[in-house]
Image (cartoon, rainbow, N blue to C red):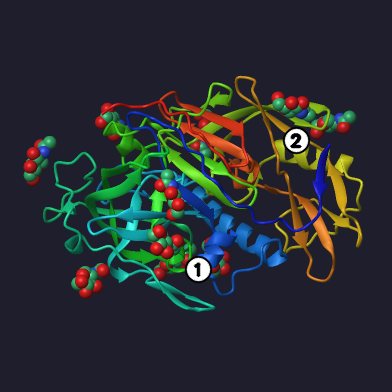
């Protein structure tokens, strides 16, 4: 049985691990959940719902659904990548919920970019005709940096002979990434500049990587509405993604990790290949748009083992987990049969169907445990299958944090909580290891230059 203490989650101090490495190893940024206290502290967004409130869950699921909705349409119609290119990529449901403070150009500027495993291109608001220049916060205006190729001495246009150039126009390479739902898009020119990295070891050695990214001149839709107000950092499998570029330049292994701490603080590390103890499962390849697609062969709810087989996208950018039947019913009904509390009546404001009332002075509760068996047989115990919702004066409820999907299956960020997840495109496996993300010592599989 999962055993939950029922009180407000405390913010924890995060101490990043370090390890020596002679060559270039991994590079990292701290990552922040959109609703984590550090991001709230930095941005202090007006109107941002309190974590744990019903509005918070509604806002998160709303965002997921926007991206989710887009996914289906993307499959059937619009190309989503560079102008003129016949590449199209699948946009998995990206919550845009994790951000990193990255540094680009000379002199360097900082950008608070959304980390997105569901897309490939990194773009920044740039010489803007239409973009978010800042946010109104309770303590005043926060201005975002806007990139400008002409203001960075290390910036250059991507030349037309570049493999990244989909279509050449007046000696520049325009791109257009379209997100069907709500007309969300970014349009601009591909440029090259320096992404400032540091080794993820005690030496903190500076490494400047020459990367290709989008100078995003016109943004629309959710990108103007807080979706990725200061740029989007695509972490997908394709060559244009920063992890691929770092690997192609021999700066890091073609593998990166993200860690999802229970408090919304995590870490991303390029070149991290995980450990020999980690669980692993192969990616399903052969799609025209490669994604972090894995297979699940069995679901264990408490002691009840159900054999089944389905594929799912491991999408760190989606807040919740979205499953189709039969997986959805196996999990929710399995939890329901074990629940000791009274079922909360259906509530259209809550994205989850299976919720239970907690009594006024209840301090703990128990739920079923949940294990997913991945293709290959390794277990993925879900440490956070439950969300606790503050009903604002009406007490608290807890819910099985799985949303019924209308289309694809997505293992969202909530199921990755408590894990150090490795997206290994060298061995084409997904890896996971239990972690509180406070202390991570990446496996420094050094790539010598
Ligand atoms: C990003 O990092 C810089 C340098 O550490 C800092 O001055 C800035 O406030 C950070 N911005 C955000 C939004 O975290
Ligand atoms: C580029 O630099 C100039 C001069 O410092 C400044 O006025 C302008 O705002 C900068 N452009 C951007 C997009 O930051
Ligand atoms: C691409 O074109 C640029 C000039 O536009 C040239 O300097 C460079 O060598 C070319 N690269 C290749 C790989 O042809
Ligand atoms: C996108 O914009 C077009 C025209 O601006 C509009 O007709 C269409 O309904 C919009 N689609 C969505 C999903 O908002
Ligand atoms: C990615 O880059 C590698 C090495 O540069 C190349 O072999 C491969 O064909 C590229 N793949 C795609 C899809 O462009
Ligand atoms: C995941 O991979 C499976 C098997 O290759 C495929 O049938 C499915 O469409 C893929 N899912 C997505 C969303 O790409
Ligand atoms: C889930 O997997 C873990 C790790 O393999 C194992 O220790 C645990 O007993 C499993 N739980 C269930 C209910 O199968
Ligand atoms: C085990 O799960 C299956 C599939 O959800 C269900 O049909 C069955 O009733 C469950 N068995 C028990 C003992 O709970
Ligand atoms: C089709 C679609 O997703 N429409 C959404 C666009 O955004 C507004 C406001 O965020 C939503 O209310 C619509 O549902
Ligand atoms: C490895 C590394 O550079 N870590 C840095 C991440 O960012 C925080 C704050 O921005 C720094 O304190 C770390 O040193």
Q: Quadrant of residue 425?
A: top left
x, y (%) of residue 393? 82, 71
Residue 408 placement, left or right of 447: right
Q: Quadrant of residue 238?
A: top left
- Disc 2: which residue: 370
Front-most of residues 15 and 173: 15
**Secondary-structure class at tag 2:** strand
Front-most of residues 352 and 97: 97
Tell me if label 2 and label 1 are in contact, CB under 8 Å. Answer: no
Q: Where the N terminus falls, by quadrant?
A: top right
Tell me if mark 2 has few (under 14), some (14-19) or many (20+) residues whose alpha carbon lies within 10 angstroms of its own.
many
Query: Residue at 14% across / 47% down in the picture?
Result: 159
Above-or-below relation of 162 to 80: above
Query: Residue at 72% across / 44% down in the picture?
Result: 385
Residue 321 placement, left or right of 21: right
x, y (%) of residue 12? 63, 53
Q: Is mark 1 within 8 Å of ligand 1?
A: yes
Above-or-below relation of 79 to 184: above
> Which of the marked residues, 2 or 1, is nearer the chain's N terminus?
1
Q: Nearer the viewer, mark 2 or mark 1?
A: 1
Query: Residue at 33% across / 41% down in the picture?
Result: 205
x, y (%) of residue 156? 16, 52
Mark number, residue 158: none
Residue 33 placement, left or right of 390: left
Q: Is mark 2 within 8 Å of ligand 7?
A: yes
Mark number, residue 43: 1
Front-most of residues 430 and 104: 104
x, y (%) of residue 125? 33, 63
Above-or-below relation of 333 to 191: above
Query: Residue at 54% across / 21% down in the picture?
Result: 276
């Amino acid at each position: 049985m999962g055993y939950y203490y029922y009180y407000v989650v405390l913010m924890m101090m995060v101490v990043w691990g370090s390890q020596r490495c002679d060559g270039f190893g991994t590079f990292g940024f701290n990552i922040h959940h959109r609703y984590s206290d550090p991001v709230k502290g930095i941005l202090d967004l007006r109107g941002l719902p309190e974590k744990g409130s019903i509005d918070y869950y509604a806002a998160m699921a709303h965002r997921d659904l926007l991206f989710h909705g887009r996914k289906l349409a993307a499959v059937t119609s619009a190309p989503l990548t560079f102008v003129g290119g016949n590449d199209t990529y699948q946009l998995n449901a990206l919550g845009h919920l994790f951000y990193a403070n990255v540094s680009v150009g000379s002199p360097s500027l900082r950008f608070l970019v959304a980390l997105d495993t569901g897309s490939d291109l990194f773009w920044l608001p740039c010489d803007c005709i239409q973009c978010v220049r800042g946010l109104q916060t309770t303590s005043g205006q926060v201005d975002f940096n806007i990139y400008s190729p002409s203001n960075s001495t290390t910036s250059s246009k991507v030349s037309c002979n570049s493999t990244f150039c989909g279509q050449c126009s007046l000696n520049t390479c325009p791109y257009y990434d379209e997100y069907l739902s709500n007309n969300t898009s970014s349009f601009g020119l591909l440029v090259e500049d320096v992404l400032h990295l540091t080794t993820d070891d005690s030496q903190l050695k500076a490494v400047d990587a020459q990367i290709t990214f989008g100078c995003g001149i016109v943004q629309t839709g959710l990108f103007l509405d807080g979706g990725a107000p200061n740029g989007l950092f695509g972490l997908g499998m394709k060559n244009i993604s920063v992890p691929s570029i770092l690997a192609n330049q021999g700066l890091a292994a073609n593998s990166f990790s993200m860690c999802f701490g229970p408090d919304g603080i995590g870490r991303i590390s390029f070149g991290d290949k995980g450990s020999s103890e980690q669980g692993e499962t192969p990616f399903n390849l052969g799609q025209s748009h490669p994604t972090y697609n894995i297979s699940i062969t069995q679901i264990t709810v408490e002691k009840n083992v159900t054999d089944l087989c389905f594929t799912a996208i491991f999408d760190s950018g989606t807040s919740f987990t979205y499953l189709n039947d039969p997986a959805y019913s196996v999990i929710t009904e399995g939890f329901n049969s074990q629940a000791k509390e009274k079922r909360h009546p259906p509530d259209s404001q809550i994205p989850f169907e299976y919720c239970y009332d907690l009594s006024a002075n209840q301090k703990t509760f128990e739920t079923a445990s949940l294990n997913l068996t991945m293709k290959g047989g390794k277990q993925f115990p879900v440490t956070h299958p439950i969300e606790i919702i503050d009903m604002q004066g009406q007490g608290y409820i807890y819910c099985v944090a799985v949303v019924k999907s209308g289309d694809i299956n997505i293992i969202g960020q909530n199921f990755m909580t408590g894990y150090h997840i490795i997206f290994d495109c060298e061995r084409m496996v997904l890896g996971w290891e239990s972690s509180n993300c406070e202390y991570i010592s990446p496996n420094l599989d050094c790539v010598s230059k």
